[in-house]
Image: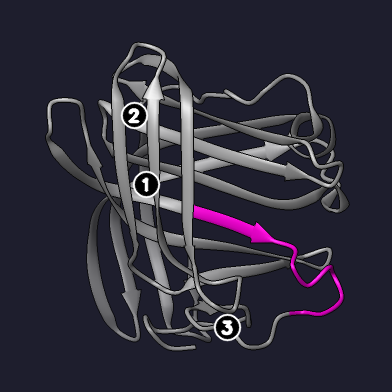
Amino acid sequence: IDDKKEGISAQLRIVDFHPSVNGYPRSGSLTDDFASHHMDIPGKVSGTVTIKGKTYNVKALGVRDRGWGARDWSTLLSHRWVAGTVGPDLSFVVLSWHAANDSMAKFAWVVKNDTLIYAKEVDIVAYVECDAISMRGGHVKLVLADGDKLDMEFTAVAPGVVSFHHNIACTDTMCRVVCTTPDGTAREGIADFETTGNLQAGKRRPAKLMTAVINDGFFPAGKE
């Protein structure tokens, strides 16, 4: 990355923790109308980022995702997509999908080391601001197929980034996650907590946001 206009450059290397995973359903509105193929891969990130002449060394966790196929945004009312990791031995993807036909999909999986385990119970709550778009974090509870329970609290660490696709505002918020494992251990990691809520019915581009950025450009943390 080298943006001379904004004075930003970066050299980053991402090493995956495990092979890419496509754990999405094979039928339903989410698959048929929006994400016929989607991969999510956690890993470690290293390198440098230079901003306005100051260089920062990066040693962090990260998640990559890739989706392709038909994407009909008119089929979406709201969704929650939470992808994150607390280390090479434990990563997760959690998703809810409310389609325009009023069907609801809700599912999740974790990868423990190299073993994929689906959740049999999923609870997702997003802490959405009063603008109904930006958010300050959230909470997820999972009961896995092997009987383990995970309790995860998410706290936003930067303003959300809003992309306005086909008259729907989609917010991605970088969060710190504290994941409490079955033995009571609280482990910290990172996650992207993505949300939509088509409350404005595709009639206008949002203009007033509390803790999110929708305009192009570079914005230091906490500023729009």
Tag 1 residue:
62
Residue at 21% x, 31% y: name it: 181
- Whole-angstrom CA distance, mark 1 to mark 3, is 26 Å
Residue at 61% x, 72% y: name it: 132
The dot on residue 188 is none
Element type at mark 3: loop
In primary-sequence order, the first of circles 2 and 1 is: 2
Which of the 4 quarters of the picture holds residue 91?
top left
The amino acid beneath tag 1 is Gly
- Whole-angstrom CA distance, mark 2 to mark 3, is 35 Å
Residue 150: image x %, image y %? 30, 32
The amino acid beneath tag 3 is Leu
Vertical arrangement, residue 207 with respect to residue 131, above or below: below
In primary-sequence order, the first of circles 1 and 3 is: 1
The amino acid beneath tag 2 is Phe
Q: Are marks 1 and 3 in contact (CB under 8 Å)?
A: no
Give the side of residue 105 with respect to residue 41, left or right: right
- Whole-angstrom CA distance, mark 2 to mark 1, is 10 Å
Vertical arrangement, residue 71 with respect to residue 209, above or below: above
Asked whether 36 or 52 is in front, the reply is 36
Residue 35: image x %, image y %? 73, 36
- State the extent of the magenta-drawn residues as a range: 193-205
Principal secondary structure, stretch drawn in magenta: loop
Residue at 51% x, 83% y: name it: 210
Residue 121: image x %, image y %? 47, 26
Tag 2 residue:
17
Mark 1 residue crowding within 10 angstroms, few (<14) / some (14–19) / many (20+): many
Tag 3 residue:
209
Give the side of residue 154 with respect to residue 103, left or right: left
